[in-house]
Image (cartoon, rainbow, N blue to C red):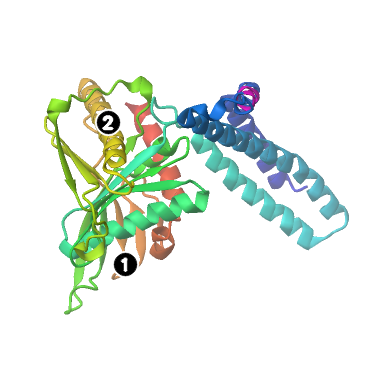
Amino acid sequence: MNPDAAADLKDLSATLESIEAVTDLPALRAEIADLSDQAGQPDLWNDTEAAQKVTSRLAHAQGDLRRLEDLRRRLEDLPVLYELAEDEGDESAIADADAERAKLREEIASLEVRTLLSGEYDPREALVTIRAEAGGVDAADFAEMLMRMYLRWAERHGYPTDVYDTSYAEEAGIKSATFQVHTPFAYGTLSVEQGTHRLVRISPFDNQGRRQTSFAGVEVAPVVESSDHVEIDEKDLRVDVYRSSGPGGQGVNTTDSAVRLTHIPTGIVVSCQNERSQIQNKATAMLVLQAKLLERQRQEERAKMDALKDTGSSWGNQMRSYVLHPYQMVKDLRTEHEVGNPSAVLDGDIDGFIEAGIRWRRSQNTES
């Protein structure tokens, strides 16, 4: 094996060892055994919510263990592949081993990013809200493009999603939308996407074909758990019921089952219209409101800490530009990570941006 490949494999093995240590494989195996025992209990499904948590956590824990074991096995197989290829002087086999090494480097780097998610709420599922900001109909269209981007990202990874509310704009696109991403660490992963996104393009809605800049905001909140104690006084709530609406404002429901909650002290407004009944929609809207209040509380605490450190906020509000004209480029304004293929990014290929964002956040926290 050539010295560069041997040194690279040694480096990859050391990185994987550190990931295995942080993950604590013996504890992970013990957790899988315990969850498997719970999943096998005959009365498991007497409590549907608890059962779903057990089976979901078990599936993800088994997936994490499988991924680590698979990476370790492939890494241990590589020196043998190189040795066989070099003994036979097979250039194509050497090229295959090089390609496998490059793939392993990418997968291990991606997994290493997960070990940087150590915040209190990072392991939670995520509630994502997207809003059209300045830019009129182009902003509404851009908000819908961003919503599709995140849903496609989740779909690519096999993460289930639930869209709770979509408020359609009159001409095209959406005013706002809220959806949940059901996977552990979704909040820690997606929280670096929070902020204002900017789109520059020739507007398809301008009959003079002028260039237009528009903005959309992304909010990410951790899903509330029973231990969070987010209390909401009924006196602080205004509840409105209305009919669900589809694109162009047409009614899609013959009953007033959609629910809008306004939290009067903070002015936070949430809606839900995807459930079958008004009661279900109100219950889901309450969960979304609790999550937003929890995130608000987390940000207020962070702001106090930043003020004490006298550093100001490390989060610039405008965080990413998507330029479709006069050139093609998507660039993160915090990390400097950039890609020259906006269509792939808008189709959900955003892992590079997310990983760069997580590493950037860790470096900001370390510096401060």
Q: Where residue 68 sits: x, y (%)?
A: 64, 36
Going from N to C along the chain, the mark reached first, 2 or 1, is 2
Q: Residues within 10 Å of mark 2 (few under 14, many from 20)?
A: many
Could you classify mark 1 by the number of other residues whose Cα lies within 10 Å: few (under 14), some (14-19), or many (20 or more)? some
Q: Quadrant of residue 20?
A: top right
Left or right of 308 in this view: 182? right
User: Which quadrant is home to the C terminus?
Assistant: top left
Residue 36 shown in magenta: yes
Q: Residue at x 30, y 33 (%)?
A: 291
Q: Provide the major secondary structure of the magenta segment.
A: helix
Which mark is nearer the camera, 2 or 1? 2
Q: Secondary structure at mark 1?
A: loop
Q: Nearer the viewer, residue 188 or 335?
A: 188
Residue type at mark 1: give it: Leu
In the visual, does 13 lie left or right of 336? right
- The CA distance from mark 2 to mark 1 is 37 Å
**Identity, as a three-letter code, of the amino acid under mark 2:** Gln
Left or right: residue 350 compared with residue 136: right
Between 27 and 182, the one nearer to me in the picture: 182
- Find out whether residue 212 is within the magenta segment: no
Q: Residue at x 22, y 27 (%)?
A: 300
Judging depth in this view, the residue of 201 and 180 nearest the camera is 180
Q: Which residues are magenta?
A: 33-37
Q: Position of residue 361 (x, y in %)?
A: 37, 35
In the rendered image, is residue 11 in sight?
A: no
Query: Regarding mark 2 in the picture, which secondary structure is present there?
Result: helix
Residue 254 visible in the picture: yes
> What residue would you read off at disc 2?
290
Q: Residue at x 18, y 24 (%)?
A: 233
Q: Residue furthest front?
A: 255
Residue holding disc 1: 324
The residue lying toward the viewer, choosing from 120 and 228, is 228
